[in-house]
Amino acid sequence: MEKLALLGGNQTVFPGLAETGKRLNVTSQAIEKTAKMMSDGEISISPAVSLLEERFAEWLGAKYVLAVCNGTTAIQAALYATGVCPGDEVIVPSYTFWAGVAPVMAVQAKPVFCDVDEESYNLSPATIERCITRKTKAIVLVHVWGNPCDMPGIMALAKEHNVMVVEDCAHSHGATCGGRKVGLFGDANMFSLQGSKVMRAGEGGLLVTENREYYERAAALGHYERLSGLQQDSDYRKYSLTGLGFKHRIHPLGAQIALSDLETLDEMNDLRDSQGREIEAKLEGLPFISFQRVLPGSRRLYSYHYARYHSEELGGVSMQTFLYALKAEGLTIGVCGYGRLHEAPFFTEPAPNGVRWHSRTTDYLPSHPPPSLPVTERLRDETFMLAPRFEAKCPQLVSAYTTACLKIWENRDALLKYERDNPPDNNTLATIRSNSVNLV
């Protein structure tokens, strides 16, 4: 049995090996094209933006695509477009990044935090149905870590209750449910192009919809310059001078960078997914790690690779010691910051200057405590980043990640003894769980 690096053994991922799984964030082609755009003065308005919208619509199979400054703004525009109004309730997960929920506040609606399915980590028809009231206007669901929600079931439920659906596809550029790409099910949906995503603009987002009215509303909200070009019968042409008060344009240089990623997106998804699946296949029998359940007939993307740690299966070794042992092996790993939004002051308290976003915040003040989300609260303490996204073919590195986890199992008694001699600091992990990706 090979000794753990934490206990004096050799590292599994030796210096230099981790680099074999990386690629440049911006391709040489994108650098060349953005340099030409700058020399041509295309730093505010450029054909690259409409080209991105056209090509993404063709790739996805969507009717309307609107490029915006970021994914957060795309969700805000989607909520506005689908008619969410002040005082309406919008069902949201807490097991997600804050930017998927904060736009509900921006349209002065009330976020209703909903628990998730324990195996998929997603909202499900069963969890959503428990939260629907007569005030429910919409659901913002997230395909967490690239794993598709049960879209047929959710859409059937939404239709039954006359509720709008917004898909947050920030992790899911190419994930499918029943052979159909996510982003084509909901009423108005979002793809993020932020720099950590599989399709990157640096900062940017895409709103997707099949509904002309929703597209025009979203355009009116933040793209005044487009409104005079809408069809003659559009109700929004008259706002071409001012729009509806916002400016949501994507930066054209970012649009060009995203176009470059789109050209290789399918090929890169296949590479990333094959290596992510290989890790899970080799670790399937380890009792202290479990993986997201993917619905039959769905394809998940390994845009982020999170798993669940079962401390009791490793003799009670804490998450902190477990992750430190993997880090000592040379792995890039981290804790999960999801699952805390329902307790976050932004959603539960008035702002520091005493201004409330609107009266709905009183629902969660001390006399009305945050909702109990038992599954979410378990997942937030037990999910961890197992591996980074491998952006190049790296069989030796993939093998090293599985070997490191197998070493943990083989050395479980020694690791437990190490922890007794070096008790974990209970506050250490809590202090770094402030975002979605928190490396240890």
Image (cartoon, helix red, strand yellow):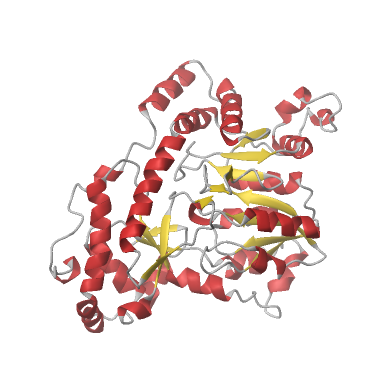
- In this image, 94 relative to 306: left or right? right
Residue 61: percent from left, percent from top: 62, 34
Residue 246 visible to an observer of this rendering? yes
Residue shown at the point (59%, 23%) measured from the top left: 45
Residue 216: percent from left, percent from top: 76, 35
The front one of 28 and 87 is 28
Residue shown at the point (56%, 76%) measured from the top left: 374
The front one of 250 and 65 is 65
Q: Is residue 242 above or below residue 391?
A: above
Quadrant of res 204: top right
Residue 149: percent from left, percent from top: 59, 56
Please give the count of numbered marks on the rendered protein: 0
Quadrant of res 9: bottom left
- In this image, 364 relative to 383: left or right? right
Residue reaching furthest to the bottom: 420
Q: Is residue 379 above or below residue 170?
A: below
The front one of 253 and 407 is 407
Residue reaching furthest to the top: 40
Q: Is residue 261 above or below residue 158?
A: above
- In this image, 169 relative to 1: left or right? right
Residue shown at the point (62%, 76%) measured from the top left: 372
Residue 90: percent from left, percent from top: 72, 59
Residue 424 visible to an observer of this rendering? no
Residue shown at the point (71%, 80%) measured from the top left: 367
Q: Quadrant of the N terminus?
A: bottom left
Q: Quadrant of the C terminus?
A: bottom left
The front one of 379 and 33 is 379
